[in-house]
Structure formats: structure tokens, C-alpha cells
Image (cartoon, rainbow, N blue to C red):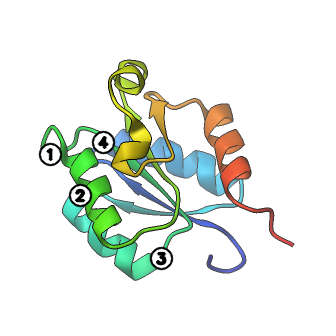
Amino acid sequence: MRDNKYVILYVDDDQDMLESVRAILEANGYIMEEAQTAELGLKKYKQCQPDLILVDLMMEEVDSGTNFAKELRFLNNNIPVYMLSSVGDSLNQQTSYSALGLAGIFQKPISPEKLLKTLKAKLKPLS
């Protein structure tokens, strides 16, 4: 948390997605930190200590999103991690996302209503 706002780290190599999610988050009182690679995402995770993480499944490498999630588990991450994927629904059916250390999977393009509802459910209201 920073300035009494929740910090969301979003890792994605698609600049349009980063900008659209930033607009949603900032308009609703969140702070967004971003990284365009899994490697930079891990560095940013250590720097900004986010309250929740969003990560794209396929970035510079096909499995970079799942590898990022695995690295977070090695770091004993205990904050919610959500994966974004254009194959989200089929990924849900093929994989146990909890086995990857994920709190859930969002289908791209992400629904602003679904994202905000999930954030409100996962992050305790500020008092």
C-alpha cells in the first residue's frame, strides 16, 4: 500500500493492455506499477511490494507468465496473483491454477467490471 491506496503490479508486454488496465485501476483509486517482461516484473515485485499482481501468460516467451508465477512461489509470495490470457477459459479447464500459485485467471480482453469486483473481494477495504 502506498499513499493509502492499494498497489497493483501488472506484468505484460502489450503496451495497449498496460495503458487500458492502468486507466481502469487509477480511475478507481488504485496505484499501478508495470513491467514489460517477467524478469523486470520480479525486480519490480521486490521494489514496490504490491498488494496484488496481474501477469500475462504469454509475453516474450510462451510460458513466461507461468514461470513468473513459479518464481514468486520460490520467493514465498503470499499476495494474490492473477494471470491474464487470451486462452483463459481453456487454460482454466486444462490447468489447476492454484497449483501454479495463482488466485485465478482472467480472459483477455479483461472485463473492467470483473477486474474491479475481484480486486474488491481480494483486497480488504481501507478503513
Q: Amino acid at mark 2?
A: Ala
Measuring from the top left, give residue 121's x and y in whole percent: 72, 48
Of tags 4 and 3, which is closer to the observer? 3
| Label 2: which secondary element | helix
Dividing the picture into quadrants, the one containing residue 97 is: top left
- Nearer-the-camera pick, 42 or 27: 42
| Label 4: which secondary element | loop
Measuring from the top left, give residue 106's x and y in whole percent: 48, 33
Q: For this view, does 112 lie left or right of residue 73?
A: right
Q: Is residue 122 above or below residue 97?
A: below
Q: Amino acid at mark 3?
A: Gln
Q: Are marks 2 and 1 in contact (CB under 8 Å)?
A: yes
Measuring from the top left, give residue 46's x and y in whole percent: 36, 78
Residue carrying label 3: 49
Q: For this view, does 70 lie left or right of residue 29?
A: left
| Label 3: which secondary element | loop
| Label 1: which secondary element | loop
Q: CA distance from mark 3 to mark 2?
A: 16 Å
Q: CA distance from mark 2 to mark 1?
A: 8 Å
